[in-house]
């Protein structure tokens, strides 16, 4: 296993279009997180899954954002009716409850540009 | 809510030690982490420390934790040009569910 992967790495879309991003976590990791990172900032938490259950969502996650992890493996993050303010790097991370330290491993991110 | 603060910039000369500082507000923080981010890349976990420890050393990296003052530092010995990156401090609750990241410190290593 080579780590967390994300697809696509870059996405340019016009305002008002829908976009979907995919994250494949490290295979034995049961937790999966989505973050958004804008220039000069640290990652901001969006949502988190344990197995297939979405356990927490940030208030940053408006109704236009939805995330799924249907079989407890890969996850998708969809943004509907994109706005220019959605332009950011979207990061996925995974971790396991099998260790006490909960350390997260990040993917390379998907950079979204909304024109 | 929880907050994590870091100074935004640090410049050091190659071969010197770098010390990156972080403060946090959540007294229930259980684990504290240091991540490194290079341009255009995701975050790479460097090291972490449990809140009942006050120091952890891993090769060139030394983490110091002052739980009373809620202050965390990362010391990089013999800093190299390849250490130039943004360093993020992060903390999590005892269940490892809610992670809060600082704004990052941009380390520039001068030859």
Image (cartoon, coloured by chain):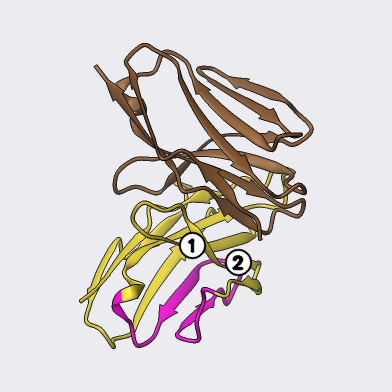
Tag 1 residue: A35
The location of residue B90, given as percent across then percent down, is: 58, 45
Give the residues in magenta.
A60-84
Residue A99, numbered circle: none
Please identify the quarter of the rendering in which residue B71 is found.
top right
Please identify the quarter of the rendering in which residue A57 is found.
bottom right
The chain whose colour is brown is: B
The total number of labels drawn is 2
The residue drawn where x is 28% and y is 88% is A16
Tag 2 residue: A48
The residue drawn where x is 36% and y is 11% is B15
Rounded to the nearest whole Å, what is the CA distance between mark 2 and mark 1?
9 Å
The location of residue A12, given as percent across then percent down, is: 22, 72
Label 1 sits on a secondary structure element that is: strand
The residue drawn where x is 59% and y is 73% is A71
B18 within the magenta span: no
Please identify the quarter of the rendering in which residue A69 is found.
bottom right
The chain whose colour is yellow is: A
Q: How crowded is mark 1: few (under 14 residues within 10 Å), some or many (20 or more)?
A: some
Which of A42 and A18 lies nearest the eye of the viewer? Answer: A42
Going by the image, does B10 lie left or right of B103? left
Compared to B77, does B10 lie above or below?
below
Which of B24 and A54 lies nearest the eye of the viewer? Answer: B24
Label 2 sits on a secondary structure element that is: strand
Going by the image, does B99 lie left or right of A12? right
Q: Are marks 2 and 1 on the same chain?
A: yes
Position of the C terminus of chain B by quadrant: top left
The location of residue B28, given as percent across then percent down, is: 77, 49
Position of the N terminus of chain B by quadrant: bottom right
Q: If you read the primary sequence from the N terminus, does the residue marked by circle 2 or circle 1 appear first?
A: 1
């Amino acid at each position: 296993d080579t780590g967390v992967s994300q697809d696509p790495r870059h996405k340019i879309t016009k305002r008002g279009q829908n976009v979907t991003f995919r994250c494949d976590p490290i295979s034995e990791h049961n937790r999966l997180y989505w973050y958004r990172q804008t220039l000069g900032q640290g990652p901001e938490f969006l949502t988190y899954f344990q197995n297939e259950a979405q356990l927490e969502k940030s208030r940053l996650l408006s109704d236009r954002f939805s995330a799924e992890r249907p079989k407890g493996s890969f996850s998708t993050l969809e943004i509907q009716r994109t706005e220019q303010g959605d332009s950011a790097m979207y990061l996925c991370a995974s971790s396991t409850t099998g260790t006490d330290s909960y350390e997260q491993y990040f993917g390379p991110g998907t950079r979204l540009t909304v024109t | 809510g929880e907050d994590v603060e870091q100074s935004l910039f640090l410049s050091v000369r190659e071969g010197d030690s770098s010390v990156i500082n972080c403060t946090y507000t959540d007294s229930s923080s259980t684990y504290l982490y240091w991540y490194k981010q290079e341009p255009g890349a995701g975050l790479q976990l460097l090291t972490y420390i449990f809140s009942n420890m006050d120091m952890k050393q891993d090769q060139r990296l030394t983490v110091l934790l002052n739980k009373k003052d809620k202050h965390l530092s990362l010391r990089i010995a013999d800093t190299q040009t390849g250490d130039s990156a943004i360093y993020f401090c992060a903390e999590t609750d005892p269940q490892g569910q809610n992670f809060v990241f600082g704004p990052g410190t941009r380390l520039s290593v001068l030859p």
